[in-house]
């Protein structure tokens, strides 16, 4: 079976590179789609804008979502993902610098599956990405992808 | 002129006083008049009561004097008898107004005529004269005496009808006066009553307005002032109250503005903290992450010095991350809303110690927490307080054996003081003032690592609760941190 891709929504190039490196280090070989802001992430998920006409049967197995994003913020992306029947059951892991209580509470109340804080220490960061990757890409069986577009 | 309540009251009192004066004065006047009339009646009628028999008696005496003189045939006695006339007249004079002047004149004339006749006849009889003439003279003299006698009877008796009339007129005057007086009294009472009612109604109406206004002010509604007519003392009260309300209103508005400004500042601070949390940490992750990546991916190409430098870069970034976290914790303590509850401090202290022991199981520390110590405060913040205080004690006793940490409560000046005491590295008492300032460290970080934020956080937590914190210590003789927490009533206890 072809592995479903992983959608990384991240505007910081450093974090993107470090995340990719961490995933690679842990042998997570899924295709990784990168969106640099919230709008791009939504375009990919809903097949609009630059992603118009992409194969909508392919949905990411997990979305790693930063909160502090240009154009459309992470929480808004999460809200729209949960609003849309096509993406309602998508696994979304909020991955962010912040450990502000409010972010955690709002993320979970909007339906985030998990909340992971990006630590400064690289090794901890690797561990966090590994935990997320292993759980959501290996252990977790995502909701069946949508078969057709009405 | 300002019609103050005081003035109006004085007017009412003055009118009442005048009315009382009028009432009493009119009574007195009536009494005086009645007395005068009575006196006139007494003067007129009293002397008359015994006047007639007296005068008849005098006439009798006078006549007998002449008869005696004739009988004794003494001319001198005739003259003496004539003196009776003067006595008679003295009585008439003494009767005063009881006898009209005209009546008195008539009496005098009749008396004179009688006396003249009597003395003349007496002399003629003594000298032995006889004859028809004398007899006629005697007869005429007797007529004169009769006339005088009847004149006395007429003059010296009073008409009873007249007396009754006089009394009736006095009674009438008295009755009239009494009824006038009654009218005056009624008029006074009514006017005082009307004035008092008018005054009290005005005052009561104003008071009602004041009461309503004060009730409105009490509820914090300053939109309308108290409206009071007139310029009396209550109007002054209303004016002062309106002034006060306006001031309160302005104060309230100032407070609202300050609150709004504070809210805005808080929101900005929150936004600032948020961006610090996100944006300052991201580059640190890059620095740390790529240093580690270099170390891992190019280990063979680097000599030991280069590796050490990379280690230092990674550690520096890590430390800055810790500092940012500590600062955020500190600002969170300041911003967080307090949710107070009863907190078991003993359990909290034991929990913190257990966690520290678990993190460094090889350390042996003698920990004593007094049983049953409770306080009223925010459980999360108090937990952070103990994390820092007991964590500090744990850190600074790391070079002691045996290490000892104690938590307890004691009473100073009737007020509960909590303390965390250790036998660790202590501090120089001269520097105690810097203990609670952020980033102030009294020890070298290679001896005792730390951010320098912990005690500042502790101080803010105690401050947020309205308590006080202070410390005592000496270098190498341990440190004791004391703090107070107000109880439920808001008193420090």
Image (cartoon, helix red, strand yellow):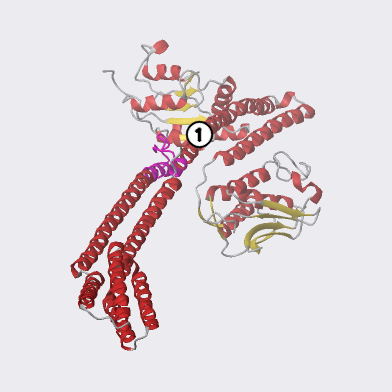
Percent position of residue B401, x then y: 76, 59
Residue B362 versus residue B186: which sits nearer the camera?
B186
Percent position of residue B415, x then y: 62, 61
Q: Is residue A117 left or right of residue B90?
A: right
View extreme (left): residue: B161
Determine whether B200 is above or below B117 in the image.
above
Q: Residue at x 37, y 82 (%)?
A: B75
- Labels in figure, total: 1
**Where does the C terminus of chain B fall, quadrant-wise?**
bottom right
Determine whether B365 is above or below B57 in the image.
above
| Residue corresponding to mark 1 | B250
In the image, residue A4 lies in the stretch drawn in magenta: no
Quadrant of residue A139 in the image?
top left
In the image, residue B231 lies in the stretch drawn in magenta: yes
Pointer 1: residues within 10 angstroms few (<14), some, or many (20+)?
few
Quadrant of residue B141 in the image?
bottom left
Percent position of residue B250, x then y: 50, 34
Q: Is residue B138 left or right of residue A20?
A: left
Determine whether B463 is above or below B141 in the image.
above
Determine whether B291 is above or below B69 in the image.
above
Q: Residue at x 20, y 70 (%)?
A: B160
Query: Circle 1 — which element?
Result: helix
Percent position of residue B314, x then y: 69, 30
Residue A115 versus residue B239: which sits nearer the camera?
B239
Give the magenta part as a residue range. B209-236
Residue B113 visible to the viewer: yes
């Amino acid at each position: 079976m072809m592995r479903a891709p992983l959608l990384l929504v991240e505007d910081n190039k450093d974090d993107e590179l470090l995340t990719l490196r961490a995933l690679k280090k842990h042998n997570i070989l899924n295709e990784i789609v990168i969106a640099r802001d919230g709008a791009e992430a939504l375009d990919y998920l809903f097949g609009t804008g630059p992603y118009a006409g992409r194969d909508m049967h392919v949905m990411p197995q997990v979305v790693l979502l930063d909160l502090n994003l240009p154009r459309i913020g992470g929480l808004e992306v999460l809200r729209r993902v949960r609003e849309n029947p096509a993406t309602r059951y998508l696994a979304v892991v909020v991955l962010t610098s912040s450990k502000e209580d409010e972010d955690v509470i709002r993320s979970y109340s909007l339906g985030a599956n998990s909340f992971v804080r990006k630590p400064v220490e690289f090794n901890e960061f690797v561990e966090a990405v590994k935990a997320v990757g292993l759980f959501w890409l290996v252990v977790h069986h995502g909701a069946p992808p949508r078969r057709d577009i009405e | 002129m300002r019609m103050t309540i005081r003035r109006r009251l004085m007017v009412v009192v003055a009118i009442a006083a005048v009315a009382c004066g009028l009432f009493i004065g009119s009574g007195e006047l009536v009494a005086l008049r009645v007395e005068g009339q009575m006196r006139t009646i007494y003067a007129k009628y009293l002397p008359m009561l015994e006047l007639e028999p007296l005068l008849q008696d005098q006439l009798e005496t006078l006549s007998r004097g002449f008869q005696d003189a004739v009988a004794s045939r003494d001319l001198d006695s005739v003259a003496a008898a004539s003196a009776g006339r003067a006595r008679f007249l003295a009585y008439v004079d003494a009767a005063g107004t009881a006898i009209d002047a005209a009546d008195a004149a008539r009496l005098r004339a009749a008396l004179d005529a009688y006396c003249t006749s009597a003395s003349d006849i007496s002399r003629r009889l003594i000298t032995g004269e006889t004859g028809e003439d004398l007899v006629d003279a005697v007869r005429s003299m007797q007529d004169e005496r009769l006339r005088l006698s009847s004149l006395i009877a007429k003059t010296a008796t009073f008409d009873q009808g007249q007396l009754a009339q006089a009394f009736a007129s006095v009674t009438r005057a008295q009755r009239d006066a009494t009824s006038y007086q009654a009218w005056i009294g009624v008029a006074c009472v009514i006017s005082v009553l009307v004035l008092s009612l008018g005054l009290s109604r005005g005052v009561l109406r104003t008071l009602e307005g004041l009461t309503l206004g004060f009730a409105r002010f009490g509820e914090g509604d300053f939109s309308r002032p108290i409206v009071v007519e007139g310029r009396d003392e209550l109007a002054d009260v209303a004016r002062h109250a309106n002034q006060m309300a306006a001031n309160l209103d302005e104060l309230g508005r100032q407070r609202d503005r300050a609150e709004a400004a504070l809210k805005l500042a808080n929101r900005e601070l929150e936004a600032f903290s948020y961006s610090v949390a996100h944006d300052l940490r991201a580059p640190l992750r890059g620095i740390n992450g790529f240093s580690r990546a270099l170390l891992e991916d190019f280990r063979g190409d680097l000599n030991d010095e280069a590796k050490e430098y990379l280690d230092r870069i990674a550690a520096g970034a890590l430390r800055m991350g810790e500092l940012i976290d500590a600062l955020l914790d500190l600002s969170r303590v300041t911003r967080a809303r307090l949710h107070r509850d009863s907190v078991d401090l003993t359990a909290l202290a034991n929990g913190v110690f257990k966690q520290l022991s678990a993190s460094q199981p090889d350390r042996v520390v003698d920990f004593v927490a007094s049983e049953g110590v409770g306080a009223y405060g925010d459980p999360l913040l108090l937990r952070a307080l103990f994390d820092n205080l007991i964590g500090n004690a744990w850190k600074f006793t790391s070079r002691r054996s045996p290490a000892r940490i104690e938590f307890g409560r004691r009473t100073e000046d009737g007020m509960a003081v909590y303390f965390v005491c250790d036998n660790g590295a202590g501090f120089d008492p001269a520097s105690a003032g810097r203990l609670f300032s952020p980033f102030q460290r009294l020890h070298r970080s290679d001896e005792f690592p730390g951010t320098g934020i912990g005690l500042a956080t502790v101080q803010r937590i105690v401050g947020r609760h309205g308590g006080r914190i202070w410390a005592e210590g000496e270098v190498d003789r341990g440190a004791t941190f004391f703090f107070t927490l107000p109880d439920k009533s808001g008193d420090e206890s």
